[in-house]
Amino acid sequence: MDADILATLPLWLAAFLLSLTCHEAAHALAGRLGGDSTASDQVTLDPIPHIKREPFGTLVVPVVSFFLQGGGWMIGWASAPYDPTWASRFPKRAALMAAAGPAANFALALIAAVAIRVGIGAGYFELPAGGLSLETLAVAPEGVARGLALFLSVLFSINLILGCFNLIPLPPLDGYAIVPLVLSDRMRHKWFGLFSGGSALLGLIVAFVVFGSIMPPVFQTAIGLLYHGV
Protein backbone atom coordinates (compact mmCIF):
# COMPACT_ATOMS: atom_id res chain seq x y z
CA MET A 1 0.00 0.00 0.00
CA ASP A 2 1.28 3.47 -0.95
CA ALA A 3 2.71 5.12 2.17
CA ASP A 4 1.68 8.60 0.97
CA ILE A 5 -1.95 7.51 0.57
CA LEU A 6 -1.93 5.89 4.00
CA ALA A 7 -0.47 9.05 5.53
CA THR A 8 -3.33 11.18 4.18
CA LEU A 9 -6.06 8.90 5.56
CA PRO A 10 -6.28 10.55 9.03
CA LEU A 11 -6.67 14.02 7.51
CA TRP A 12 -9.28 12.82 5.02
CA LEU A 13 -11.21 11.01 7.75
CA ALA A 14 -11.03 14.01 10.10
CA ALA A 15 -12.41 16.33 7.42
CA PHE A 16 -15.06 13.80 6.42
CA LEU A 17 -16.26 13.19 9.99
CA LEU A 18 -16.32 16.93 10.73
CA SER A 19 -18.45 17.48 7.63
CA LEU A 20 -20.92 14.71 8.46
CA THR A 21 -21.08 15.70 12.12
CA CYS A 22 -21.84 19.36 11.35
CA HIS A 23 -24.43 18.33 8.75
CA GLU A 24 -26.35 16.07 11.12
CA ALA A 25 -25.90 18.35 14.13
CA ALA A 26 -27.45 21.17 12.09
CA HIS A 27 -30.42 18.95 11.23
CA ALA A 28 -30.85 18.02 14.88
CA LEU A 29 -30.53 21.61 16.12
CA ALA A 30 -33.05 22.91 13.59
CA GLY A 31 -35.43 20.13 14.60
CA ARG A 32 -35.09 20.91 18.29
CA LEU A 33 -35.60 24.63 17.68
CA GLY A 34 -38.68 23.74 15.67
CA GLY A 35 -40.17 21.62 18.43
CA ASP A 36 -38.90 18.11 17.67
CA SER A 37 -36.53 16.79 20.35
CA THR A 38 -36.11 13.34 18.75
CA ALA A 39 -32.49 14.02 17.74
CA SER A 40 -31.49 16.12 20.75
CA ASP A 41 -28.54 13.85 21.49
CA GLN A 42 -27.24 14.57 17.98
CA VAL A 43 -26.97 18.32 18.66
CA THR A 44 -23.22 18.06 19.20
CA LEU A 45 -19.98 18.51 17.28
CA ASP A 46 -18.63 15.45 19.06
CA PRO A 47 -18.55 12.79 16.30
CA ILE A 48 -18.97 9.88 18.75
CA PRO A 49 -22.81 10.00 19.03
CA HIS A 50 -23.06 10.22 15.24
CA ILE A 51 -20.64 7.32 14.80
CA LYS A 52 -22.58 5.21 17.31
CA ARG A 53 -25.79 5.85 15.38
CA GLU A 54 -24.28 5.03 11.96
CA PRO A 55 -20.92 3.24 12.45
CA PHE A 56 -21.05 1.61 9.02
CA GLY A 57 -21.73 4.84 7.14
CA THR A 58 -19.42 7.07 9.16
CA LEU A 59 -16.35 4.83 9.47
CA VAL A 60 -16.40 1.55 7.56
CA VAL A 61 -17.65 2.79 4.18
CA PRO A 62 -15.48 5.95 4.12
CA VAL A 63 -12.28 4.07 4.94
CA VAL A 64 -13.01 1.19 2.54
CA SER A 65 -14.00 3.57 -0.27
CA PHE A 66 -10.84 5.60 0.32
CA PHE A 67 -8.61 2.59 -0.21
CA LEU A 68 -10.64 1.15 -3.08
CA GLN A 69 -10.22 4.41 -4.97
CA GLY A 70 -6.53 4.69 -4.18
CA GLY A 71 -7.00 7.72 -1.94
CA GLY A 72 -8.35 11.09 -2.93
CA TRP A 73 -12.03 10.46 -2.18
CA MET A 74 -14.45 9.10 0.42
CA ILE A 75 -18.14 8.30 0.50
CA GLY A 76 -20.35 7.62 3.49
CA TRP A 77 -23.38 8.84 5.39
CA ALA A 78 -24.88 9.67 8.78
CA SER A 79 -28.39 10.44 9.95
CA ALA A 80 -30.44 12.42 12.45
CA PRO A 81 -33.84 10.99 13.46
CA TYR A 82 -37.04 13.02 13.47
CA ASP A 83 -40.67 12.53 14.45
CA PRO A 84 -42.83 11.96 11.32
CA THR A 85 -45.92 13.14 13.18
CA TRP A 86 -44.20 16.43 14.02
CA ALA A 87 -43.07 16.79 10.39
CA SER A 88 -46.63 16.24 9.19
CA ARG A 89 -48.02 18.83 11.61
CA PHE A 90 -45.28 21.40 10.90
CA PRO A 91 -44.13 20.85 7.30
CA LYS A 92 -42.37 24.21 7.05
CA ARG A 93 -40.35 23.50 10.18
CA ALA A 94 -39.50 20.05 8.83
CA ALA A 95 -38.33 21.66 5.57
CA LEU A 96 -36.12 24.05 7.51
CA MET A 97 -34.69 21.10 9.42
CA ALA A 98 -33.83 19.47 6.08
CA ALA A 99 -32.25 22.68 4.77
CA ALA A 100 -30.04 23.06 7.83
CA GLY A 101 -27.76 20.18 6.82
CA PRO A 102 -26.66 21.52 3.41
CA ALA A 103 -26.46 25.02 4.90
CA ALA A 104 -23.92 23.73 7.43
CA ASN A 105 -21.88 22.17 4.62
CA PHE A 106 -21.79 25.41 2.63
CA ALA A 107 -20.77 27.28 5.79
CA LEU A 108 -17.85 24.87 6.32
CA ALA A 109 -16.83 25.21 2.66
CA LEU A 110 -16.81 29.00 3.07
CA ILE A 111 -14.71 28.79 6.23
CA ALA A 112 -12.23 26.51 4.46
CA ALA A 113 -12.11 28.87 1.45
CA VAL A 114 -11.37 31.89 3.66
CA ALA A 115 -8.63 29.96 5.48
CA ILE A 116 -7.07 28.91 2.16
CA ARG A 117 -7.08 32.47 0.85
CA VAL A 118 -5.60 33.82 4.08
CA GLY A 119 -2.92 31.11 4.00
CA ILE A 120 -2.03 31.92 0.39
CA GLY A 121 -2.00 35.65 1.08
CA ALA A 122 0.29 35.16 4.08
CA GLY A 123 2.67 32.94 2.12
CA TYR A 124 1.86 29.96 4.35
CA PHE A 125 0.33 28.05 1.42
CA GLU A 126 1.17 28.02 -2.26
CA LEU A 127 -0.86 27.61 -5.42
CA PRO A 128 -0.64 24.03 -6.72
CA ALA A 129 1.80 23.91 -9.64
CA GLY A 130 0.92 20.37 -10.62
CA GLY A 131 -2.80 20.90 -11.19
CA LEU A 132 -5.85 20.96 -8.96
CA SER A 133 -7.44 17.99 -7.22
CA LEU A 134 -9.86 17.65 -4.32
CA GLU A 135 -6.94 17.57 -1.90
CA THR A 136 -4.57 20.06 -3.56
CA LEU A 137 -6.50 23.33 -3.75
CA ALA A 138 -3.57 24.73 -1.79
CA VAL A 139 -0.21 23.14 -1.04
CA ALA A 140 2.78 23.61 1.20
CA PRO A 141 6.24 22.08 0.92
CA GLU A 142 6.40 20.29 4.27
CA GLY A 143 5.46 20.04 7.92
CA VAL A 144 2.29 21.27 9.59
CA ALA A 145 1.54 23.65 6.73
CA ARG A 146 1.42 20.76 4.26
CA GLY A 147 -1.04 18.81 6.39
CA LEU A 148 -3.19 21.88 7.02
CA ALA A 149 -3.30 22.69 3.30
CA LEU A 150 -4.50 19.17 2.54
CA PHE A 151 -7.07 19.25 5.34
CA LEU A 152 -8.53 22.59 4.22
CA SER A 153 -8.58 21.48 0.58
CA VAL A 154 -10.46 18.32 1.49
CA LEU A 155 -12.78 20.21 3.83
CA PHE A 156 -13.69 22.66 1.06
CA SER A 157 -14.20 19.94 -1.55
CA ILE A 158 -16.20 17.54 0.63
CA ASN A 159 -18.57 20.21 1.90
CA LEU A 160 -19.17 21.74 -1.51
CA ILE A 161 -20.00 18.29 -2.84
CA LEU A 162 -22.14 17.25 0.15
CA GLY A 163 -24.04 20.52 0.13
CA CYS A 164 -24.80 20.40 -3.60
CA PHE A 165 -25.59 16.68 -3.69
CA ASN A 166 -28.05 16.93 -0.83
CA LEU A 167 -29.92 19.75 -2.56
CA ILE A 168 -31.01 17.46 -5.40
CA PRO A 169 -34.82 17.25 -4.94
CA LEU A 170 -35.12 13.47 -4.94
CA PRO A 171 -35.72 11.09 -2.01
CA PRO A 172 -34.00 10.36 0.29
CA LEU A 173 -31.91 13.53 -0.09
CA ASP A 174 -32.52 16.73 1.83
CA GLY A 175 -33.56 18.60 -1.28
CA TYR A 176 -36.67 16.44 -1.52
CA ALA A 177 -37.79 17.57 1.94
CA ILE A 178 -36.78 21.20 1.34
CA VAL A 179 -39.12 21.71 -1.65
CA PRO A 180 -42.30 21.91 0.52
CA LEU A 181 -40.89 25.06 2.07
CA VAL A 182 -42.24 26.94 -0.95
CA LEU A 183 -45.36 24.85 -1.61
CA SER A 184 -48.94 25.20 -0.47
CA ASP A 185 -50.51 22.40 1.58
CA ARG A 186 -52.29 21.01 -1.50
CA MET A 187 -49.15 21.09 -3.62
CA ARG A 188 -47.09 19.59 -0.80
CA HIS A 189 -49.30 16.50 -0.66
CA LYS A 190 -49.03 16.15 -4.44
CA TRP A 191 -45.25 16.52 -4.23
CA PHE A 192 -44.88 13.76 -1.65
CA GLY A 193 -47.35 11.63 -3.61
CA LEU A 194 -45.04 11.69 -6.63
CA PHE A 195 -42.38 9.72 -4.77
CA SER A 196 -44.34 7.36 -2.57
CA GLY A 197 -43.69 3.65 -2.37
CA GLY A 198 -40.02 2.86 -1.79
CA SER A 199 -38.45 5.28 -4.24
CA ALA A 200 -35.35 6.03 -2.14
CA LEU A 201 -33.03 3.66 -4.01
CA LEU A 202 -34.23 4.87 -7.40
CA GLY A 203 -33.88 8.45 -6.23
CA LEU A 204 -30.26 7.87 -5.20
CA ILE A 205 -29.41 6.23 -8.52
CA VAL A 206 -30.93 9.10 -10.51
CA ALA A 207 -29.28 11.64 -8.20
CA PHE A 208 -25.83 10.15 -8.80
CA VAL A 209 -26.37 10.21 -12.56
CA VAL A 210 -27.57 13.82 -12.52
CA PHE A 211 -24.85 14.87 -10.11
CA GLY A 212 -22.13 13.72 -12.48
CA SER A 213 -23.32 16.34 -14.96
CA ILE A 214 -24.02 19.28 -12.66
CA MET A 215 -21.09 19.10 -10.25
CA PRO A 216 -18.14 19.79 -12.62
CA PRO A 217 -19.37 23.27 -13.66
CA VAL A 218 -20.36 24.03 -10.06
CA PHE A 219 -16.91 23.01 -8.85
CA GLN A 220 -15.18 25.04 -11.58
CA THR A 221 -17.24 28.09 -10.64
CA ALA A 222 -16.38 27.63 -6.95
CA ILE A 223 -12.67 27.31 -7.77
CA GLY A 224 -12.87 30.48 -9.88
CA LEU A 225 -14.36 32.32 -6.92
CA LEU A 226 -11.80 30.80 -4.55
CA TYR A 227 -8.87 32.06 -6.64
CA HIS A 228 -10.48 35.29 -7.85
CA GLY A 229 -7.83 38.01 -7.92
CA VAL A 230 -4.94 35.61 -7.23
Image: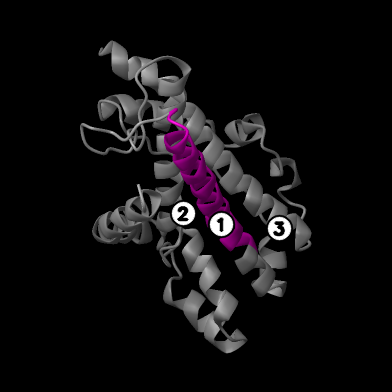
Q: Which residues are magenta?
A: 97-124
Q: Is residue 210 visible?
A: yes
List x then y, in percent, for residue 105. Answer: 52, 50
Number of numbered tags placed on the structure image: 3
Q: Residues within 10 Å of mark 2 (few under 14, many from 20)?
A: many
* Disc assigned to residue 53: none
Quadrant (top left, top right, bottom left, bottom right) of the N terminus:
top left
List x then y, in percent, for residue 191. Answer: 48, 79
Tell me the SS state at disc 3: helix
List x then y, in percent, for residue 161. Answer: 39, 49
Separation of marks 1 and 2 at Cα, in angstroms: 7 Å
Q: Along the polypeptide, which appears first: circle 1 or circle 3? A: 3
Separation of marks 3 and 2 at Cα, in angstroms: 18 Å
**Is 71 a magenta residue?**
no
* Disc assigned to residue 163: 2
Q: Is residue 185 above or below residue 103?
A: below
Q: Quadrant of residue 93?
A: bottom right
Residue at 37% of width from left, 61% of height from top?
203
Tell me the SS state at disc 2: helix
Q: Is residue 20 above or below residue 14?
A: below
Amino acid type at circle 3 is Gly
Q: Which residue is mark 1?
A: 103
Residue at 57% of width from left, 62% of height from top?
99
* Disc assigned to residue 31: 3
The residue lying toward the viewer, choosing from 142 and 105, is 142
**Is 111 a magenta residue?**
yes
Cβ atoms under marks 1 and 2 closer than 8 Å? yes
Q: Residues within 10 Å of mark 3 (few under 14, many from 20)?
A: many
Q: Along the polypeptide, which appears first: circle 1 or circle 2? A: 1
Amino acid type at circle 1 is Ala
